[in-house]
Amino acid sequence: MARLVKQSLGQEVTRMLKRMIIDGELEPGQRLVEDRLAAELGISRTPLREALHRLEQEGLLQKRSAGGYVLRPFDAEEVEEAVQVRALLEARVAALAARRATPEQVAALRANLAAFGEAAAGADVARLAELNAEFHLLLRAAGGSLLLARLLDEIEGVVERIIRALVPLREAGEWSDDDHARIVAAVEAGDADAAAEAMRIHVLHGGEAVLDTLRHAEGETPPLK
């Protein structure tokens, strides 16, 4: 039983650190000091080490030869691969949601969409980030695939961290609002193919915005398709 509690704490710390990374509280190249992080989070070093190791496996952190971890730098090719994989997985989630969503789940998506529009109109960056994350979680719940949810959880940290760092959320909110509306309309209509295509375009939209920025630093990269 104690082992289960330990695993649960390690997973919770992983989620906390991932959110700090995505929100920009930790900078690329910044060295993560275990003692300081453990004190800030109010935890022991054992679950922290477990979380750091897991985030290294997910590609968010890089282990230093001298010890400790740093946030991994951006790499255009790796970002493109992560976006392509996420687009496939999220499209499948949207298709499943179109087939399985209950009226209550559709209503929750509609409520999220309305709140997202208000946040975009008011340029409420923090609220946009919160509602965007909620939107994708609502779709995953409606899709009902634990496997897809788990796979997406492993790769979205990489994509979201880079999008958040390189694409202003105020700007992203303008096109995300329209994208989300198309996805919700397809889910509500029960049109799995339309939902999948709308989601695929949505994810690639964000990825293309990121790569546009990275191309200036690394040279030209073919557009996402």
Image (spheres, rainbow, N blue to C red):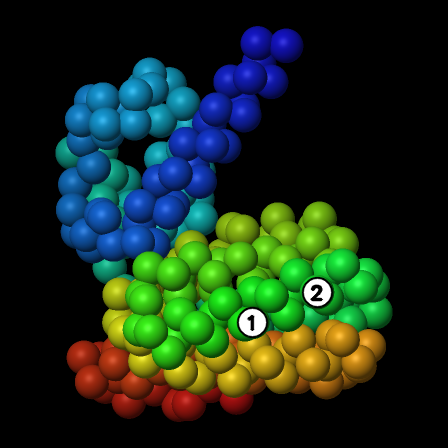
**How far apart, in angstroms, are the residues tagged by discs 2 and 1?**
10 Å
Q: Nearer the viewer, residue 54 or 127?
A: 127
Q: Position of residue 157 (x, y in %)?
A: 42, 55
Q: Nearer the viewer, residue 45 or 116?
A: 116
* Three-letter amino acid code at the position of disc 2: Ala
Q: Nearer the viewer, residue 191 or 216?
A: 191
Image quadrant in which you'd find residue 55? top left
Q: Is residue 3 left or right of residue 130?
A: right
Please report whichever mark, 2 or 1, sits nearer to the chain's N-terminal start.
2
Disc number for residue 107: 2
**Around disc 1, counting alpha carbons within 10 Å, would you say few (fewer than 14), some (14 to 19), or many (20 or more)?**
many
Q: Position of residue 152 (x, y in %)?
A: 57, 56
Image quadrant in which you'd find residue 207? bottom left
Disc number for residue 52: none
- Residue name at image x 42 percent, y 37 percent: 14
Q: Position of residue 123 (x, y in %)?
A: 31, 73
- Residue name at image x 37 percent, y 47 percent: 19
Residue beneath disc 1: 113
